[in-house]
Amino acid sequence: PIRVEMISSVSVFEATKYRNKEIFEDDDLSEWEGIYLGYSQTKWVSDRLVYLAGKSGLPTTIYRPPLIGGHSINGDWNQGDLVQRLLQGCLFLGMIPQIDWELDLVPVDYVANAVTSLAWDDKTKGQCFHLHHPRPLMLNDLLSSFLGEGTALKLVSMDEWLSGISSDSNNPLYPLQTFFKKRWGPEQLTYPELNSKGVRSRPSCLKTSRILNNLNIKCPDYLDLVKPWSNTLLMDLSQQH
């Protein structure tokens, strides 16, 4: 049969059981309780179907990228994407929520290069790959690096941050207020809180990185991404407003 290549998502790790747990590429992700977003639920179901089909003999490969950012060279972003809006919205507001929001963010060309290389390798059949950044970064640290030395965003409570967004319809995050305000599950955590350090799962990419290194594909360090990303994000922001 024809080999099936599936682009899955970091969303498949959102079950309550996987919170603050290290998840390896070969782990059986059978748990689903605590996955609240409809997008994440569909990703888990489709990932699970392909995974089980692989165990039954269908040649499959599953790729699980995290949040996907702009190109590592030209800095181009997917316009209107959640991550682009998040970064631009904080810069526009001059504020950042006082929460340990951990971004597992990689450039789009890294994901494309990784998938296209692994997909044509016979040895990767039947495996799962985590295309995460080897060193996740805090949202505040990434934004601060965009602004340069001596400039900082104001750390505010989540309520003040949301209030600031709601007060200006020009803010890129204005249409997404409900997404950030909605509270999920018995613990009533918001999406940023679910993605905070110590709560979100910790997908391991050691196996994936080792195999990709042998193919001469490496995920760029954040220091190398600051210039192309900040130039494009800030330019787009100034053109919009």
Image (tube, rainbow, N blue to C red):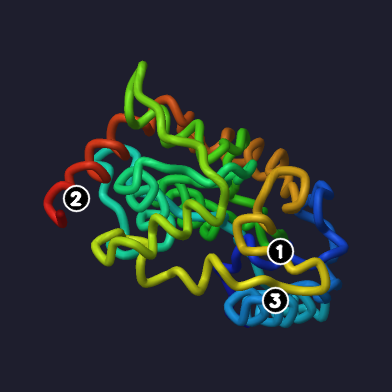
User: Which residue in the protein does label 3 denote?
Assistant: 36
User: Which residue in the protein does label 1 denote?
Assistant: 189
The residues bearing labels 3 and 1 have C-alpha atoms spaced at a distance of 11 Å
Q: Secondary structure at mark 3?
A: loop
Q: Nearer the viewer, residue 180 or 2?
A: 180
Q: Position of residue 57 (x, y in %)?
A: 78, 78
User: Which residue in the protein does label 2 denote?
Assistant: 236
- At 36% from the left edge and 17% from the top edge, which residue is drawn? 150
Q: Which three-letter amino acid code belongs to the residue tagged 3? A: Tyr
The answer to whether 233 appears left or right of 174 in the picture is left
Q: Residues within 10 Å of mark 1 (few under 14, many from 20)?
A: some
Q: Position of residue 141 (x, y in %)?
A: 50, 31
Q: Nearer the viewer, residue 183 or 32?
A: 183
Q: Position of residue 136 (x, y in %)?
A: 60, 38
Q: Secondary structure at mark 1?
A: loop
Q: Which three-letter amino acid code belongs to the residue tagged 2? A: Asp
The C terminus: image quadrant: bottom left
Upstream in sequence: badge 2 or badge 1:
1
